């Protein structure tokens, strides 16, 4: 009698539908979404309710949600392999969030660094949703009994408070929630992609200077132009070392996208000039993003297919999350 295959662990990850992700988002996270689908049971979500902490233009927001859904599919998320859905289409997220907020301490939320940062950036709109954001994130994760949550270093605090909430609830009512672990992939060189105009800062789609970041949907000529303007230094040597942030960033991008080591990339550019390096990194980037952009165009042109995937994904997510919500409701005494 053959042994049963070990049960795959569950991974949960979500992305806000605000703006087009950058090359940094793709390298650091999105391409991993596709890669993880064969080894894990993946639950992927467009977290549109999280985006409501900032005022959105309704018509534009609807378009962004649909486009974000299509773009993740273009990056390799397969609705047949993964549970892939839009957060607001599964009411259990908001329902569990309210219940969990009654098991979350005010002091815990007030210590969250993201709340402090965003409050400082948007003092005109410090709303309660911004404060309770981590509770909704905890509900997102715990609804699917996720074992692992892929996060960057800046998001670890959200997984920690999720674990605290789950442990507190389990301590009162028994083993209700799986306690999730942060999943931080071994950081290959270049997983943290920096701004092209200020290589001391992380590449961000909220950068006021559009030349600082590469959008996944930037056309090839825009990509090449932005790389040509990338900040380097004055010593003219293409090598990866401390103090050469701009060159380090370009070598890291080239290394990750070609599968070469940094040493191999240095060797490839030995004796070449900075202009040649920028041109080659731009070309490799444009070629990497080309099939994603083509698939995105195909998907957005087929609205009926997209909407069918969205409906099916919501049904799958609702079926799984309903079991957790029913268990929680029974434990706390709701009829």
Image (cartoon, rainbow, N blue to C red):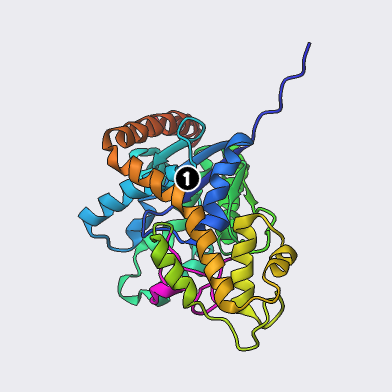
Please tell me which residue is depicted at 56% across the width and 51% down the height of the picture.
Answer: 162
Q: In the image shown, does 85 or 236 lie closer to the viewer?
A: 236
Name the residue that disc number 1 marks.
Answer: 140
Q: Is residue 118 left or right of residue 169?
A: left
Q: Position of residue 129 (x, y in %)?
A: 37, 59
Q: Position of residue 97 (x, y in %)?
A: 43, 47
Is residue 201 found inside the magenta-colored segment of the image? yes
Q: Position of residue 193 (x, y in %)?
A: 57, 66
Q: Quadrant of residue 284?
A: bottom right
- Residue at the front extreme of this rendering: 271
Is residue 153 found inside the magenta-colored segment of the image? no
Q: Quadrant of residue 158?
A: bottom right
Q: Is residue 133 left or right of residue 152?
A: left
Q: In the image shown, does 256 or 79 lie closer to the viewer?
A: 256
- Residue at the top extreme of this rendering: 1
Crowd rating for badge 1 (residues with CA inside 10 Å; few <14, some 14–19, many 20+): many
Picture layout, residue 285 above or below residue 168:
below
Picture layout, residue 208 above or below residue 159:
below
Q: Can residue 256 be seen from the camera position used here?
A: yes
Q: Is residue 252 left or right of residue 79?
A: right
Please tell me which residue is depicted at 35% across the width and 70% down the height of the picture.
Answer: 126
Determine the main secondary structure of the stretch shown in magenta: loop
Q: Is residue 39 left or right of residue 301?
A: right
Position of the N terminus, as image quadrant, is top right
Q: Can residue 175 be seen from the camera position used here?
A: no
Q: Position of residue 140 (x, y in %)?
A: 47, 45
Please tell me which residue is depicted at 54% across the width and 38% down the height of the picture.
Answer: 42
Position of the C terminus, as image quadrant, is top left
Picture layout, residue 235 above or below residue 73:
below
Picture layout, residue 97 above or below residue 219:
above
Q: Which residues are magenta?
A: 192-215
- Residue at the bottom extreme of this rendering: 234
């Amino acid at each position: 009698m053959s042994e049963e295959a070990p049960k795959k662990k569950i991974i949960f990850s979500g992305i806000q539908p605000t703006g087009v992700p950058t090359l940094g988002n793709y390298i650091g996270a999105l391409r991993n979404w596709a890669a993880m689908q064969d080894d894990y049971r993946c639950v992927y979500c467009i977290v549109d309710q999280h985006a409501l902490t900032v005022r959105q233009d309704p018509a534009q927001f609807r378009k962004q949600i649909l486009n974000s859904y299509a773009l993740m599919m273009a990056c390799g998320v397969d609705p047949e392999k993964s549970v892939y859905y839009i957060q607001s289409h599964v009411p259990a997220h908001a329902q569990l969030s309210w219940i969990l907020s009654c098991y979350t301490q005010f002091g815990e939320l007030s210590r969250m660094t993201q709340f402090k940062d965003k409050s400082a950036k948007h003092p005109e709109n410090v709303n309660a949703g911004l404060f309770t954001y981590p509770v909704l994130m905890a509900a997102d994760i715990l609804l699917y009994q996720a074992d692992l949550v892929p996060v960057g270093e800046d998001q670890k605090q959200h997984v920690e408070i999720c674990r605290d909430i789950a442990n507190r609830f389990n301590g009162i009512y028994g083993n209700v929630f799986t306690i999730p672990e942060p999943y931080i992939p071994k950081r290959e060189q270049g997983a943290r992609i920096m701004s092209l105009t200020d290589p001391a800062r992380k590449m961000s789609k909220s950068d006021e200077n559009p030349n600082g970041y590469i959008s996944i949907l930037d056309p090839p000529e825009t990509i090449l132009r932005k790389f040509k303007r990338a900040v380097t230094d004055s010593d003219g040597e293409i090598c990866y070392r401390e103090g050469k942030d701009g060159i380090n960033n370009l070598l890291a991008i080239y290394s990750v996208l070609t599968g070469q080591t940094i040493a191999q990339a240095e060797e490839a550019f030995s004796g070449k000039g900075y202009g040649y390096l920028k041109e080659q990194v731009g070309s490799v980037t444009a070629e990497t993003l080309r099939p994603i952009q083509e698939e995105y165009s195909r998907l957005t042109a087929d609205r009926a297919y997209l909407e069918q995937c969205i409906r099916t994904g919501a049904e799958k997510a609702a079926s799984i999350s309903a079991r957790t919500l029913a268990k929680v409701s029974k434990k706390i005494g709701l009829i």
